[in-house]
Image (cartoon, helix red, strand yellow):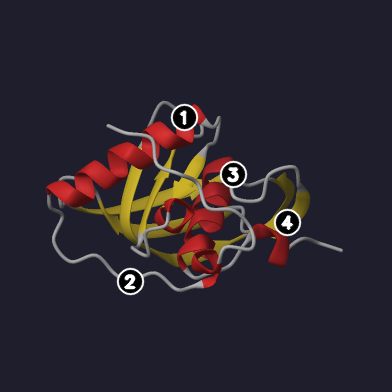
Amino acid sequence: MALRNLRYEGDEILRKKSKEIGAVDDRIKTLLDDMLETMYENDGVGLAAPQVGILKRAVVIDVDDGNVYKMINPKIIKKSGEQLGQEGCLSVPEKKGNVNRPMNVTVEYTDDSGKPVTLKAEGILARAICHEVDHLDGILFIDRVKK
């Protein structure tokens, strides 16, 4: 595993839409492992591939629920409820803001072994999934901050 360099607000790659990943090969597994190490090193709870300069649809999340999520091509298929909460971002240091997110989401993705997964998430995990999927579409949390 290796640390990757973070990209910060103002870097055009953070505003681009990421491409779907085909096969889950060793390069993708290494990317996910590197992203996880980079996230932990920077005290984050989630990281998307564009944040390390890679325009691929991959995210890693660890919200201290006992699981580490490595998601390839995540797609939110269902949302319900609402929660307003404070967010920050490793790519937008020093800024925080209140963002409305769904309380519950169902997400479909491929895991790092190539297996399809459907996950029902709520609360902080649902928030983290929405935040990271936004990154894959070139959206930063500051675009959604409640004024």
Image marks 2 and 3: residues in contact by CB distance under 8 Å? no
Q: Which residue is mark 4?
A: 99
Mark with earlier residue (4, 2)? 2
Residue for point 52% across, 52% down: 7
Q: Which residue shows up at 40% across the image and 54% down it?
A: 49
Of the two numbered discs 3 and 4 in the rendering, the one whose residue sits closer to the viewer: 3
Q: Which mark is residue 70?
A: none
Residue at the spot of label 1: 40
Q: Are marks 1 and 3 in contact (CB under 8 Å)?
A: no
Callout 4 amino acid = Val
Q: Amino acid at mark 1?
A: Tyr
The residue carrying mark 2 is 19
Q: CA distance from mark 4 to mark 2?
A: 26 Å
Spatial separation of the CA atoms under disc 2 and disc 3 = 21 Å
Q: Nearer the viewer, residue 64 or 82?
A: 64
Nearest to N terminus: mark 1 or mark 3 = 1
Q: Which residue is mark 3?
A: 90
Q: x, y percentage for residue 22?
A: 17, 66
Q: Residue furthest right?
A: 147
Q: Quadrant of the C terminus?
A: bottom right
Q: Is residue 6 rendered to the left or right of residue 28?
A: right
Real-space Cα separation, disc 3 to disc 4, in angstroms: 16 Å
Query: Quadrant location of residue 42?
Result: top right
Residue 62: image x %, image y %? 45, 35
Amino acid on which disc 2 is placed: Lys
Q: Measured along the vertical axis of the image, is residue 68 above or below residue 123?
A: above
- 137, above or below 106, in the image: below
